[in-house]
Amino acid sequence: MPTTCGFPNCKFRSRYRGQEDNRHFYRIPKRPQVLRQRWLSAIGRTEETVVSQLRICSAHFEGGEKKEGDIPVPDPTVDKQLNIELPPKENKSADRRRKQTAPARFSNQDSSEGSPSYLKKSRTIRDLYPPPFGQFHVKI
């Protein structure tokens, strides 16, 4: 399915090949919210009129390539490229490591007093799945 640029008065579609062959399409950023709002105001949209398939072609960025913090403009050769300073990104890997560490009460696995009940005794299949009501096991 062809992609159409969502910038007002831009008719570029990905299906058409030719001298504009090397254009790329960029999604509206979700985060940070400040950048998203600036993009939406630049293309004349609101949160209610944005669809997930909306893309902006690379012709609306200086040099034909979007950089971090760039805001699309109608014609980068005529209009000054808009850019905002973004806050530093949070380190997600440090957050993941922090969440993966075991709580203090589970750090000593040798003692059974701090362990959860499912670790205290070994269970068999019969313990987990008792026979249905009315069936008895007979020893012969």
Image: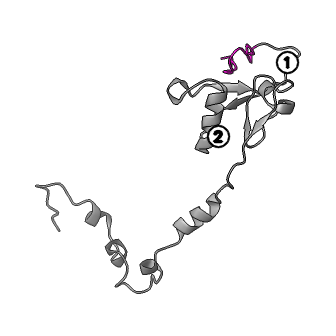
Residue 46 sits above or below residue 83 on the image: above
Answer with the quarter of the image where residue 117 lies: bottom left
Answer with the quarter of the image where residue 45 lies: top right
Q: Tell me the amino acid under the disc marked 1.
A: Glu
Indicate the position of residue 123 as horizontal and vertical percent values. Answer: 32, 70
Q: Residue at x 86, y 14 (%)?
A: 18
Q: Residue at x 52, y 30 (%)?
A: 47
Residue 20 tag number: 1
Q: Residue at x 63, y 61 (%)?
A: 93
Residue linked to disc 2: 35
Which residue is more in the foreground, 112 or 129? 112
Q: Residue furthest right?
A: 19
Indicate the position of residue 4 as horizontal and vertical percent values. Answer: 68, 18
What secondary structure is marked by label 1?
A: loop
Quarter of the figure that contains the N terminus: top right
* Circle count: 2
Q: How is the image coloured?
A: one colour
Name the mark nearer the viewer: 1 or 2: 2
Q: Is residue 18 left or right of residue 72?
A: right
- Residue 140 in view here: no
| C-beta proximity under 8 Å, tags 1 and 2 | no
Residue 110 sits above or below residue 140 on the image: below
Quarter of the figure that contains the C terminus: bottom left
Indicate the position of residue 7 as horizontal and vertical percent values. Answer: 69, 21
Segment colored magenta = 1-15
Residue 11 sits above or below residue 74 on the image: above
Label 1 packing within 10 angstroms: few (<14), some (14-19), many (20+) = few
Q: Is residue 49 left or right of residue 56?
A: left
Magenta span main SS: loop
75 is within the stretch colored magenta:
no
